[in-house]
Amino acid sequence: MFDLALPWWEFVLRGALVYLVLLILLRLTGKRAFGEMAPFDIVVLMLVGGALRSALVGDDKSIAGPVICVATILALDKLLGWIAARSRLFDAMLEGRAVVLARNGALLPAALERNSISRAAFERELRVHDLRSLADVDEARLEPTGRISFVRRHGGE
């Protein structure tokens, strides 16, 4: 149960490497990858987890191997967060920057396309934020978290 199939340091290396590769792949897929979890996002997440199991622990059937991998991933995540909180450049590389999707009541279709957001999804977000139409929006941004934020237009503008 506690006998490792590989040296402990290999679980650390595997965990760190898989974490970094997955982080890079998720950044390359764009901000909306997991910002709003749709059913197909959940399926992708489950498949990715299953596919990466052997990359993390190989043929190890112990309790210790996966625990070492998870501890490594959590520690690395905490370290990257700590660095990002202290470095604006690193934070921008890790998290990305907000993207303007609409300004002064006008949608920016090219920004929606670049970020794989359909007009219907954008309109759903308007309703979620209690906005009746795009005319009520001064600015809409796709945040680094994958969520869309809105700044309401003030009356009379």
Image: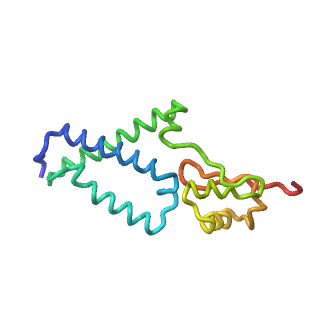
Q: Residue at x 74, y 66 (%)?
A: 133
Q: Residue at x 36, y 39 (%)?
A: 76
Q: Residue at x 79, y 55 (%)?
A: 153
Q: Nearer the viewer, residue 28 or 42?
A: 28
Which residue is at the far top? 86
Q: Which quadrant, please, contains the C terminus?
A: bottom right
Which residue is at the far front? 110
In-image side of 146 versus 42 (left or right): right
In-image side of 10 versus 71 (left or right): left
Q: Is residue 67 placed above or below 91 in the rendered structure?
A: below
Q: Residue at x 42, y 37 (%)?
A: 80
Residue 71 placement (x, y as % from top left): 29, 43
Residue 89 placement (x, y as % from top left): 53, 32
Q: Nearer the viewer, residue 59 or 32?
A: 32
Residue 17 placement (x, y as % from top left): 30, 42
Q: Is residue 130 placed above or below 75 in the rendered structure?
A: below
Q: Is residue 120 placed above or below 33 in the rendered structure?
A: below
Label tally? 0
Quadrant for residue 148, please give it.
Answer: bottom right
In-image side of 110 versus 138 (left or right): left
Quadrant for residue 39, please give it.
Answer: bottom left
Residue 73 placement (x, y as % from top left): 33, 44
What colouring does the structure picture have?
rainbow
